[in-house]
Image (tube, rainbow, N blue to C red):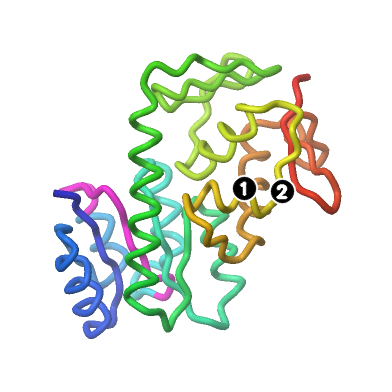
Amino acid sequence: MTRILVVDDEPALVDAVGYALRSEGFEVETAADGEAALQTLNADGAELVVLDIMLPRLSGIEVCRRMREASDVPIILLSARDAEVDRVLGLESGADDYVTKPFSMAELLSRVRAVLRRRELDLRATGSAVMRIGRLEIDPVRHTVRVEGKPVRLTPSEFKLLALLAGEPERVFTRREVMQHLWDSTYVGDQRACDIHMSNLRRKVERDPESPEQLVTVRGVGYKLVAV
């Protein structure tokens, strides 16, 4: 049974989200603040984290950052409708998706399934050959990336984005195509998230993220990966 950690300091919301997830067959753990969330994840593990940004004791942004340093567990952020800056910071800290409050349980469950589905597809990518493009080496089986022979840690969404571009070098992918691939659905959400994931990815694989050589922007269209 898939275990999901729900982190929020609003008891009513935690109860509602927990009930919805359990009704879909998930096992649910909960935490009411950031420190408790980290302790629960370390002690019991989880296959996905639903994490509110506004938390007592330790912010959701900091919790996300610390989780990402230690694990590649998928993270879905919950954010207030007017907190765009927080959502951007959350994605920059390694979150895979975000859901804006107030939200419907149907929307949240759809996002949870999409994130878990693409995680499962990544883990099941057995038999795929290692891809080498320029300075990059991408192993879909082991879910690893090396840059000039040195390993780099990517979030699940960053890896999925890089693998998409590496699958067809030199092809330009639109932001919409990227987002549909990341969410594994026709839902594309805020395409600004695509730019954030790309920015994060460039910081990890480019020599100079401000002047990218491999992850190239095609103005007005999207992105492509080139061999250099």
* Residue topped by disc 2: 174
Residue 178 numbered tag: 1
Taking the image as shown, residue 227 lies to the left or right of residue 184, namely right
- Say which residue appears at 49% left-offset and 53% top-offset: 183
Inter-mark Cα distance, 1 to 2: 6 Å
Q: Is residue 222 above or below residue 191?
A: above
How many numbered callouts?
A: 2
Tags 1 and 2 touching, CB below 8 Å: yes
Q: What residue type is labelled 2?
A: Thr
User: Is residue 109 or residue 96 the one in the foreground?
Assistant: 109
- Say which residue appears at 28% left-offset and 62% top-offset: 35
Image spot of residue 102 (x, y percent): 42, 83
The image quadrant where one finds the C terminus is top right
Image spot of residue 150 (x, y percent): 56, 19
Q: In which quarter of the image is residue 107?
A: bottom left
- Say which residue appears at 44% left-offset and 60% top-offset: 62
Q: Is residue 51 magenta?
A: yes
Q: Is residue 3 above or below residue 32?
A: above
- As helix, strand or loop, the secondary structure at mark 1 comes to helix
Image spot of residue 9 (x, y percent): 29, 78
Q: What residue type is labelled 1?
A: Val
The residue carrying pointer 2 sits among few (fewer than 14), some (14 to 19) or many (20 or more) residues within 10 Å by Cα, namely some
Question: Residue farthest to the front?
Answer: 186
Magenta region, residue range: 41-54
Q: Does the magenta stretch include residue 38?
A: no
Residue 37 numbered tag: none
- As helix, strand or loop, the secondary structure at mark 2 comes to strand
The residue carrying pointer 1 sits among few (fewer than 14), some (14 to 19) or many (20 or more) residues within 10 Å by Cα, namely many
- Say which residue appears at 61% left-offset and 21% top-offset: 147
Taking the image as shown, residue 158 lies to the left or right of residue 55, namely right
User: Is residue 30 or residue 100 the one in the foreground?
Assistant: 100
Image spot of residue 217 (x, y percent): 80, 43
